[in-house]
Image (spheres, grey):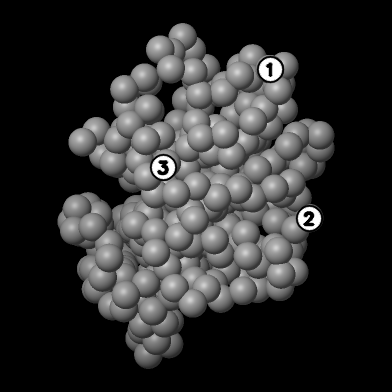
């Protein structure tokens, strides 16, 4: 399991390589999205490479002995984790190979290449790309970095929890998008230790309810299909580590549609001037469409976890 000491150690380790991203209060606005007294937006879309994934990837990088790094790094990604790993490889000056599912936007692939990564498309969904990455790791001796089921990655993502509470110690409710569950596992572990009464709510796509179904079943569920276009929130299967942490620390998981995420991304752009991808707008979508209805007295924080142009068109 991941504890607060692991996350605080990660915070010290990665501090000089990541940004302390802004936490802003979302008012005044033309179109309020909930009745809560205070709504904070944590703009992790302004993190280096455009998402929180740099935190976990860099923490994992710095936990690998330098003599093992020479062959390079490999992973599979819907795009954002790959960017975090590409950034980590750029820091260490080692080669990076990223396996992407065929559904990954070409713009993400080009962005990966701009950080010096080799990009290989393999499989229809992340799980298939991941099998190819694991095979390459085994055959070529590359250091594999899992996007959500590695304790060092989870601890790195968890550094967002103390960072939010440092800027807004009074929050009552925290909304976090879920893909494989590494982000919410890390954040919830930190927040439960630092402010135990905080309500923690996960948000998944209707078209990829991986942890929603696993929590309901009380065991890991592998989805038969993925129908969301939010590729960074779309593994067919999570891991036992993530599920166990989520079962302990997360109060509820709600589901949003792709169209609801798109509308939320448009709200972020038109009201806040924030450019988010579908996954980055998932937490806001849960508020905008009443999947979460905070009391007027609550202070709510929604994480905007990934940059993109889905709300601009």
Question: Considering the numbered disc 3 on the image, is that residue within a helix, a strand or a loop?
Answer: helix
Given residues 154 and 272, the one toward you in this image is 272
Percent x, y for residue 82? 36, 60
How much space separates mark 1 and mark 3, taking CA atoms? 23 Å
Q: Earlier in the sequence, mark 2 or mark 1?
A: 2
Residue where numbered disc 2 is placed: 248
Q: Is mark 1 on a helix, strand or loop?
A: loop
User: Where 280 falls versus 213 (above or below)?
Assistant: above
Mark 1 closeness class: few <14, some 14–19, many ≥20 residues within 10 Å: few
Q: Which quadrant of the view contains residue 79?
A: bottom left
Q: In this view, does 201 lie to the left or right of 271?
A: right
Q: Label 2 vs label 1: CA separation?
A: 27 Å
Residue at (48, 12) in percent of width and height: 27
Give the x, y percent position of residue 45: 39, 37
Q: What residue sits 39% from the left and 79% below the top? A: 128
From where the camera sits, is residue 57 visible? no
Residue 195 vs residue 273: left or right? right
Q: Is residue 157 above or below residue 212?
A: above
In the picture of the structure, the residue carrying the numbered disc 3 is 261
Q: Around disc 2, counting alpha carbons within 10 Å, would you say few (fewer than 14), some (14 to 19), or many (20 or more)?
A: few
């Amino acid at each position: 399991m991941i504890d607060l000491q692991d996350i605080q150690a990660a915070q010290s380790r990665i501090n000089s390589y990541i940004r302390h991203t802004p936490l802003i209060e979302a008012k005044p606005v033309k179109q309020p999205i909930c009745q809560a007294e205070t709504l904070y937006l944590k703009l992790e879309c302004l993190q280096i490479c455009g998402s929180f994934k740099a935190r976990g990837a860099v923490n994992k990088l710095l936990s690998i002995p330098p003599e093992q790094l020479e062959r390079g790094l490999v992973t599979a990604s819907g795009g954002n984790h790959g960017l975090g790993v590409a950034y980590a490889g750029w820091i260490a000056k080692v080669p990076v190979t990223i396996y992407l599912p065929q559904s990954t936007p070409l713009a993400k692939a080009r962005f990966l290449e701009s950080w010096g990564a080799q990009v290989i498309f393999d499989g229809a969904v992340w799980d298939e790309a991941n099998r190819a990455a694991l095979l390459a790791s085994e055959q070529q001796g590359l250091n594999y970095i899992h996007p959500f089921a590695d304790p060092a990655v989870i601890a790195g993502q968890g550094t967002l929890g103390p960072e939010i509470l440092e800027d807004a110690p009074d929050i009552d409710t925290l909304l976090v998008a879920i893909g494989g569950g590494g982000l919410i596992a890390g954040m919830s572990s930190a927040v439960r230790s630092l402010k135990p009464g905080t309500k923690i709510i996960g948000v998944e796509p209707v078209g990829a309810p991986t942890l929603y179904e696993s929590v309901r079943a009380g065991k890991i569920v592998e989805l038969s299909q993925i129908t969301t276009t939010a590729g960074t929130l779309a593994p067919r299967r999570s891991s036992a580590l993530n599920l166990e942490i989520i079962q302990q620390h997360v109060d509820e998981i709600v589901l949003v549609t792709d169209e609801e995420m798109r509308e939320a991304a448009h709200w972020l752009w038109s009201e806040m001037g924030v450019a988010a991808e579908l996954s980055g707008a998932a937490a806001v979508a849960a508020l905008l469409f009443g999947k979460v209805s905070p009391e007027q007295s609550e202070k709510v924080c929604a994480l905007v976890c990934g940059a993109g142009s889905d709300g601009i068109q």
